[in-house]
Image (cartoon, rainbow, N blue to C red):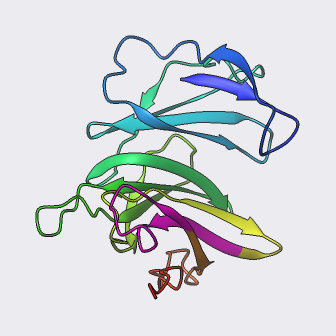
Amino acid sequence: MGVATSKKPAGDFVVQGYVQGLGDDTFAMIDPCVFVDDNGQAYFYYGGGGRCAGAPLKENMLELAEPLTFMEGLVDFHEAAWVHKKDGVYYLSYADNHSENGKGNNRLNYATSTNPLGPWTYGGVYLDPTGCDTSHGSIVEYKGQWYAFYHNCVLSGQGNLRSICFDKLYYNPDGSIQKIKQTGLLQKK
């Protein structure tokens, strides 16, 4: 996995190198995610082929501080790991292997933990298929409101040509995530 940095979010990136310490067991491991905890500790996650792994990063963000840990407790993990934290609970969201009509059309699931490296407790599906061949997403807080970002293919009509969508995300009092109502699905004219 390569690392590039910039002082701007949309350009002028400079290659810094590769994440060191991933080991030799990296077949099908894709879709990296970096989560920075409240104490400033950064964690690296990625996965594929039914496996998800993570580890703390050294301060230089280019080396693992510890060997990779394979995440336990995830149900039907496929790819696209994303980690966020709310009210002291860690949430790992990911795409599953769900299939509709023999096509990919996977869903976004989540699991929770009191530790950034698990073990995880499966929470369920928070985003149904969007019409794309696969679903990837992220969850962020902005000005006190949580949002889920994802993609669909309504504009292109092709499962692998994706458009970015987002919707407000809501949590139940017990911390579980409510299923998203996809208002980001644009209407074709």
Residue 118: x and y in percent read 47, 44
Question: Where residue 52 sits: x, y (%)?
Answer: 39, 38
Residue range corresponding to the magenta coloring: 146-164
Tell which residue pokes out farthest to the front in this image. 189
Residue 157 sits inside the magenta stretch: yes
Could you tell me how many numbered marks the image carries? 0
Q: Hey, which residue is sitting farthest right in the picture?
A: 7
* Residue displayed at 46% across by 87% down: 187
Which sits in the foreground, 116 or 80?
Answer: 80
Instruction: Decide: is 73 above or below 105.
Output: above
Q: Report the front residue among 164 and 170.
A: 164
The picture places residue 7, in percent across and down from the top left corner, at 88, 36
Please determine whether, in this image, residue 150 is positioned above or below residue 54. Answer: below
Nearer to us in this view, 12 or 52: 12
Q: Residue at x 60, y 19 (%)?
A: 64
Q: Quadrant of residue 160?
A: bottom left
Q: Give x and y (percent) for residue 157.
A: 36, 69
Residue shown at the point (52%, 40%) measured from the top left: 117
Q: Is residue 186 left or right of residue 88?
A: left
Q: Residue furthest left?
A: 102
Q: Reply above or below: 10 against 169.
A: above
Asked if the stretch drawn in magenta spans residue 159, the answer is yes
